[in-house]
């Protein structure tokens, strides 16, 4: 697929990311600082969802220009998120565990997703069939375990990560 085709096919998603990026930047300058940061986080989360959808639309075979565009998008978006986390350190000292929890849950689910194709897992969890009470309870127990484990891990990891991010921010000033 050529870059022009990709942009024509996904212009609505690309436009939505641009709009969310603009809103994120504008919200960070609200007079009530903490409210601007919270609203910026929400719009940044929206950008992450849209970016993930754009990434899913990328074909396996692509032109060199589209290949470069993919990495420019990836690194540009990553740099924007990194800057945002560095710039608003006062709120991330308290709330860094939130995006870390979301990231951990996402990564665990993506890692476990191939296991759902195994026959024993399908049978135990009732995947593709009517679930009984035990299967519903087991699915809920696994979900709670993943979320709680991710939350606990994110809380633990946020302490040293905040120290590292503070050091990085201080080295730039």
Image (cartoon, rainbow, N blue to C red):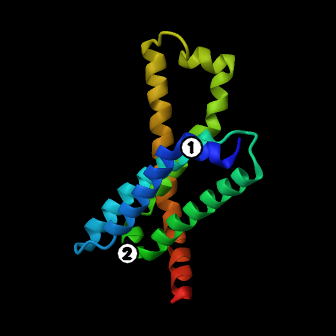
Relative to residue 23, is residue 29 depicted above or below?
below
Given residues 149 and 17, the one toward you in this image is 17
Q: Residue at x 44, y 29 (%)?
A: 140
Judge from the rendering whether residue 60 lies leftward or rightward of residue 37; answer left or right. Answer: right
Residue projecting furthest to the top: 130
Q: Quadrant of residue 59?
A: top right
Q: Is residue 4 above or below residue 74?
A: above
Q: Residue at x 55, y 14 (%)?
A: 128
- Is disc 2 in contact with disc 1, using a CB cutoff of under 8 Å? no
Classify 10 Å Cα crowding around label 1: few (below 14), some (14-19), many (20 and above).
few
Look at the numbered disc 2 and give the secondary structure of its residue. helix
Measured Cα–Cα span from mark 2 to mark 1: 40 Å
User: Which numbered disc, 2 or 1, marks the residue closer to the eye?
Assistant: 1
Name, please, the residue furthest toward the left. 32
Question: Is 79 placed left or right of 94 in the picture?
Answer: right
Q: Looking at this view, is 147 or 168 the one in front?
A: 168
Q: Position of residue 168 (x, y in %)?
A: 56, 80
Residue placed at 51% from the left, 40% from the top?
146
Q: Which residue is denoted by mark 1 in the rendering?
A: 8
> For residue 171, what is the image quadrant?
bottom right
Q: Is residue 149 visible?
A: no
Looking at the rendered image, the quarter that the N terminus falls into is top right
- The residue singled out by tag 2 in the image is 90
Q: Earlier in the sequence, mark 2 or mark 1?
A: 1
Q: Which mark is residue 160?
A: none
């Amino acid at each position: 697929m050529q870059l022009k085709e990709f942009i024509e096919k996904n212009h609505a998603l690309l436009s939505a990311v641009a709009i969310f990026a603009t809103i994120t930047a504008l919200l960070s300058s609200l007079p009530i600082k903490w409210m601007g940061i919270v609203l910026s986080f929400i719009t940044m989360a929206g950008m992450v969802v849209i970016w993930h959808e754009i990434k899913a639309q990328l074909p396996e075979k692509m032109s060199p220009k589209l290949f470069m565009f993919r990495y420019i998008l990836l690194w540009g978006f990553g740099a924007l998120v990194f800057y945002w986390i560095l710039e608003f350190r006062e709120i991330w000292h308290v709330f860094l565990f939130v995006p870390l929890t979301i990231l951990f849950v996402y990564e665990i689910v993506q890692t476990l997703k191939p296991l759902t194709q195994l026959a024993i897992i399908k049978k135990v969890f009732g995947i593709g069939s009517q679930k009984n009470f035990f299967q519903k309870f087991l699915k809920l127990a696994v979900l709670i375990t993943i979320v709680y484990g991710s939350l606990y891990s994110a809380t633990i990891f946020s302490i040293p990560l905040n120290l590292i991010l503070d050091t990085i921010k201080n080295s730039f000033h």
